[in-house]
Image (cartoon, rainbow, N blue to C red):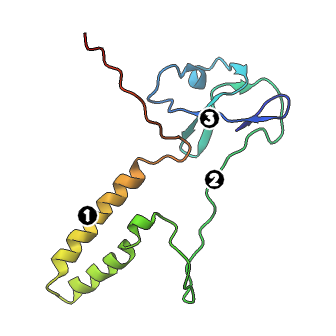
Amino acid sequence: MVKDQAGIYHEIRPVDMQSETDMQSFYDGINTTGVPTRYDKTANGILLDVIPAYNSSAGLKVFINRSGSYFTSTDTTKKPGFSALFHEYLALRPSYQYAFRNSLKNTGVIQNEMLLMEEKIKRHYGKRERDIKRQLKANVENNH
């Protein structure tokens, strides 16, 4: 969120300046000023589309994840910090390692389940961006 000249925060739109069009204001070197309406996350930086035409302390609000909350040996109710769909993985991986090291007959079955879940985890988290809201859009076709 960016603060305007009146001190009111407004949400700004995320963009990918490397793959979208009309991104010149991010990198053209003209130092365009105004009220920012878009931002791009690149590496460890947040780039605004224009330079604010006003001074403001605490002019940006950035929402981030909190630091980890780790398990201890006495925890009985704490949950892992990822999707419940994949909590079973916390048992699959050590089960596979135990079965492999002890040459158990079901090693292959456990390995297949573990690898399948790893692929599901990669797909699930690979297409997720918290600052972009998912939307359903109609596909308009002209059937003349």
Lower sequence index among marks 2 and 1: 2
Residue name at image x 56 percent, y 78 percent: 78
User: Can you identify the residue that label 3 sits on?
Assistant: 47
Placement of 126 over or under 97, stated as above or below: above
SS class, disc 2: loop
The spot of residue 72 in percent (x, y) is: 56, 84
Most extreme residue toward the left is: 105
Lower sequence index among marks 3 and 1: 3
Placement of 93 over or under 130, stated as above or below: below
How crowded pointer 1 is (Cα within 10 Å; few <14, some 14-19, many 20+) is rated as few
Would residue 27 appear left or right of 9 to someone viewing this image? left
SS class, disc 1: helix
**Residue depth check, mark 3 versus mark 1: number of the one nearer the observer:** 1
User: Can you identify the residue that label 2 sits on?
Assistant: 64
User: Can you identify the residue that label 1 sits on?
Assistant: 116
Amino acid beneath label 1 = Leu
Most extreme residue toward the right is: 6
- Image quadrant for the C terminus? top left
The spot of residue 98 in percent (x, y) is: 27, 86
How crowded pointer 3 is (Cα within 10 Å; few <14, some 14-19, many 20+) is rated as some
Measure how far apart labels 2 and 1 are at the Cα level. 30 Å
Would residue 105 appear left or right of 23 to someone viewing this image? left
* Viewer-nearest residue: 23 or 141: 141
**Residue depth check, mark 2 versus mark 1: number of the one nearer the observer:** 1
Measure how far apart labels 2 and 3 are at the Cα level. 16 Å
Measure how far apart labels 3 and 1 are at the Cα level. 38 Å
